Image (tube, coloured by chain):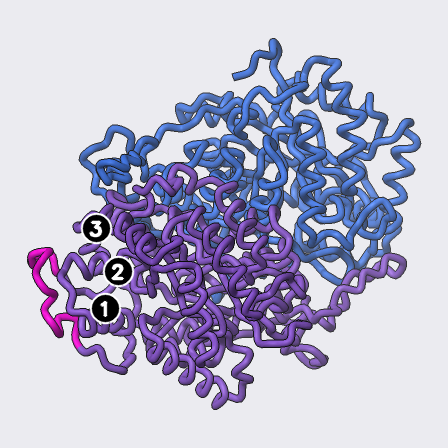
Chain colours: A purple, B blue
Amino acid sequence: MSSQPTRQLHLNAFIYPAGHHEAAWRHPLTQPERVFDADYYQQIAKTAEAAKFDGIFFADGPALRSEARYNAAGRLEPIALLSSVAAATDRIGLIATASTTYYEPYNLARLFSTLDFLSQGRAGWNIVTTSSEAAAENFGLPAHPDPSIRYERAREFVDATVRLWDSWEDDAVVLDRDAGLYADTDKIHRAEFVGKHLQVRGPFNAPRSPQGHPVLVQAGASNDGRAFAAQYAEAIFTAHQTLDHAQAFYADIRSRAKALGRNPDHVKILPGISPFIADTERGARELEQEFNELTVPAYGLFQLRGITQVDLSEIDLDASVPEDIFGDAGDVTDNKRSRKQVVAGIVAREKPTVRQLLHRLAGARGHRVVAGTPEQIADTIEEWFTSGAADGFNVMPPYYPGGLEVFTDTVVPLLRERGIFRTEYTGTTLREHLGLPRPASQFAGDRVGSHAS
Amino acid sequence: MSSQPTRQLHLNAFIYPAGHHEAAWRHPLTQPERVFDADYYQQIAKTAEAAKFDGIFFADGPALRSEARYNAAGRLEPIALLSSVAAATDRIGLIATASTTYYEPYNLARLFSTLDFLSQGRAGWNIVTTSSEAAAENFGLPAHPDPSIRYERAREFVDATVRLWDSWEDDAVVLDRDAGLYADTDKIHRAEFVGKHLQVRGPFNAPRSPQGHPVLVQAGASNDGRAFAAQYAEAIFTAHQTLDHAQAFYADIRSRAKALGRNPDHVKILPGISPFIADTERGARELEQEFNELTVPAYGLFQLRGITQVDLSEIDLDASVPEDIFGDAGDVTDNKRSRKQVVAGIVAREKPTVRQLLHRLAGARGHRVVAGTPEQIADTIEEWFTSGAADGFNVMPPYYPGGLEVFTDTVVPLLRERGIFRTEYTGTTLREHLGLPRPASQFAGDRVGSHAS
């Protein structure tokens, strides 16, 4: 699909209302008054598209997830939002997060299929099980299910959803006006999914979408999350602070995928990177410091408690964080500890004060923050890309829209000079941008299965 | 909100993939190969907007609802689709159907709120309880719930959803950068809805949308449907074959609304009308006949069975429909019979053969089909509008896109000459087009209620 000679980076713009830094909305470089306007996101998407990024990406969750007193906490529903962005763009991939714990497969399959049609093959689904406990009560559940239950349902959910997306074979629509035959109903199948948590009969109520189905994306780093990703994910968004952790994760996922009989090259691994960029390293650090000084400690402590279930509010802000308060920073990846471990790792390596730790996390909620010149940013991207740590990056600008623009204006040209990032799109769909195959319908050629009434 | 002197008509374009006539996709005037393309719907919306229509409208249901062998049966999810249309238009209202039986309030509230933001105040929700029995098995339910249960849940669903939409008061977002105060959390309330079918805690995860909340639309004609509409609906889409039935419905709804303490002028009643238009009445009838001759009897019988639960397939197509086979055509409006009654009424009045009945229903599934010159179409619209039968019409072109274009090109100018339809928009939101007030948040001024964490 690509005529380019060497392996190419993949770049997504991870969009966060005013920017990924938690105090972004307070900084004069941002436009928080626009975060509920379609044209704000269309503008950002056009910037990413002009730079030939693979896609843009939105996180999501069905609850008010952080303290609205101190941050632009509200958010638009990302599938509808990306449907609007689709109308304003031609090539950029459009990836929305949606929860398998708090949706129904038939409804979600329709939303993503529609986005794939509206964008002519640019949709991606970031599959999450939702970490916010507050979501449960928005759906009448007595409690947020345990991670193992959430992943069990997630597997059923994705299986059922893909069956729905596959239920019309690619050539089911005949459109023979003279014969009065619209579709060959032998090629429209019921999903007939029966699981422990979900039952979905189908058939789906739309033909197969341009990409066969939207690209499946995942972000879990726990053992359950890795197992899930290795089986289902075509792209993985991941958080690593250090090269060796990223390399270990990269190798682990590829070996798991291979063990499951998948081609590991069809699982693109994209760590997050949140870059502060200036002409000098000192200027970049000063910019980061400007943002950090705008943080509100009460908010940072609230966020930290949400990530780690550990409350540091009784400790003086300028005292050291007690070692081991977040537990072991080792390699264990049980369900409840993957995000906490990132924090434990920072504490073990850097021995910060509480305030320093809050600043460290303010940038991108545990993702890697780097401050430097365009050369330095390009260097670290190239290093991770060429040393078995990444197939590309989920770029998380600390502030929008300018933080993306400085990246596309100054870092992207360097990546091109080094021959590792495209100068033009070579395909039209997100699958083509990512070098992923278009999946065949699992019902293709199956003429025995039950079909539409 | 309007400076126009006389009462003005409201017009919606009810969009159906290739057109409302069931054989539309076979006719050379249609473009069935485009019915999954965003630009097809954007083009139709622009036609309606150029004619200053109030809105466009999509039906929906979470199941493959008719025999795909004989009709363009698949459909895009309408909220995502309208989000794409929003990006290509500026003023036209955007009304999507969604089911209270097969959605969760938190998810649906987010989709519609987002559409309202993306369109800067043009969203409407056509509230349905879903009539297709096939939907249940797509959601793991043992059976489609009875209408009375569906309406009971619908009431809870709308109450919960409006509480979510109201949960941020209009002035909750403070955006004080200097003080680091994004929102006044005393003005963000939990929904705290506890019903028999649904529990939703909230708060919602977005501010109040431009219209306060999307316009609430409803289409039920049964007793439960009328009671629901009188309480909740701000616009009603309804199906009537005759003026006297439409007048009776109009009077009934207004008196029910008044009895509930509502201003009946804030319930706009819009019957469906499916017009075949030509320079001569004979030409219009010939055009209708062209479409009718493209119908497939097996499909018509299938559809009729779906509407009435009566199977006529054993009767000769050219034999008369047995009188009373559909029961009483009288005024009773129990839950299961409202659609069947429209059919019974046609049989009682017109004494058709089976084929004639199928042709009669082929136009718009029981909605009123008229064939005539632009003058004749304008005459019947004006007559219904001025004789207490309608506040406007849900225009259902038998074929798209041309069937809407001929209406806007030839009928709309006549309505303007008669002074009953706008020449320019006087507002920017769907509420303003319809002359509906912007509702206050039910929490406004409530400083005692629980608020966001």
Residue A378 in sight in this render: yes
Q: Amino acid at mark 1?
A: Val
Chain ID for label 1? A
Query: What secondary structure prevails in the magenta region?
Result: loop
Q: Amino acid at mark 2?
A: Leu
The magenta region covers A312-327
Membership of B243 in magenta stretch? no
Q: Secondary structure at mark 1?
A: helix
Q: N-terminal of the two: label 3 or label 1?
A: 3
Closer-to-camera residue (B325/A241): A241
Closer-to-camera residue (A407/B238): A407
- Horizontally, residue A167 falls left or right of residue A102, namely right
Q: Residue B426, percent across and down?
A: 57, 19
The residue that mark 1 highlights is A343
* Figure quadrant of residue B346: top right
Which quadrant would the N terminus of chain A be assigned to in this image?
bottom right
Q: Circles 3 and 1: CB distance less than 8 Å?
A: no
Dot label at residue A299: 3
Q: Amino acid at mark 3?
A: Tyr
Q: Is residue B408 above or below residue B297?
A: above
Q: Residue B122, percent across and down?
A: 53, 34
Q: Circles 2 and 1: CB distance less than 8 Å?
A: yes
- Labels 3 and 2 positioned on one and the same chain: yes
Q: Secondary structure at mark 3?
A: helix
Which quadrant would the C terminus of chain A be assigned to in this image?
bottom right
Task: Tell me the distance, in whole angstroms, between the alpha carbons under discs 2 and 1.
Answer: 8 Å
The residue that mark 2 highlights is A361
